[in-house]
Image (cartoon, rainbow, N blue to C red):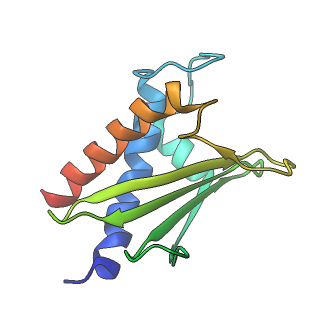
Amino acid sequence: MTARSTFEPFAAKFVRVYWETVKSGAFPMPPNEPVEETVDELLSTISTKTRFARVPGNKFDSFQLSMINESGDSWRFLFQPAFDGAWQLVGASTQPEGGKQAHDLLGPVYAEWFTPFLRHVTEMANLRHTT
């Protein structure tokens, strides 16, 4: 089984866990408003796309997961296969609808909130992917 063939099923699990975690409120972020939609309602407003993403200067294969919601907000996650068969998150960004510049979710401005959140989502998606 190749990394390319296992990424799509992992990405689907990542998307579901992402929105389940948002809905749960387990990782509050400003403005910390409650999510009233169900997980399935949230998922129905999101489209996703995956692709192989060669990163210049990086010897490891990378795969990108993109999500976009109905209002045009988008998220991009970059993953690499780990040696144990799991997936490792190596990049994350978001771009608000109409925004000219993407925001690095793992960079100094947003890492305080998004690093633990995305670590949790990635771990849970990997668990679901291997079971």
Q: Please state, as top left, top right, bottom left or bottom right, where the C terminus lies in the image.
A: bottom left
Total numbered circles:
0
49 above or below 88?
A: below
Q: Nearer the viewer, residue 31 or 83?
A: 83
Q: Residue at x 39, y 76 (%)?
A: 61
Q: Nearer the viewer, residue 1 or 54?
A: 54
Q: Residue at x 57, y 61 (%)?
A: 66
Q: Nearer the viewer, residue 32 or 62?
A: 62
Q: Position of residue 30 (x, y in %)?
A: 63, 18
Q: Position of residue 83 (x, y in %)?
A: 18, 66
Residue 10 vs residue 52: left or right? left
Q: Please state, as top left, top right, bottom left or bottom right, where the N terminus lies in the image.
A: bottom left
Q: Nearer the viewer, residue 51 or 91?
A: 91
Q: Residue at x 62, y 16 (%)?
A: 33
Residue 129 vs residue 29: left or right? left
Q: Position of residue 123 (x, y in %)?
A: 27, 44
Q: Position of residue 75 (x, y in %)?
A: 61, 51
80 above or below 40?
A: below
Q: Residue at x 50, y 67 (%)?
A: 64
Residue 32 vs residue 82: left or right? right
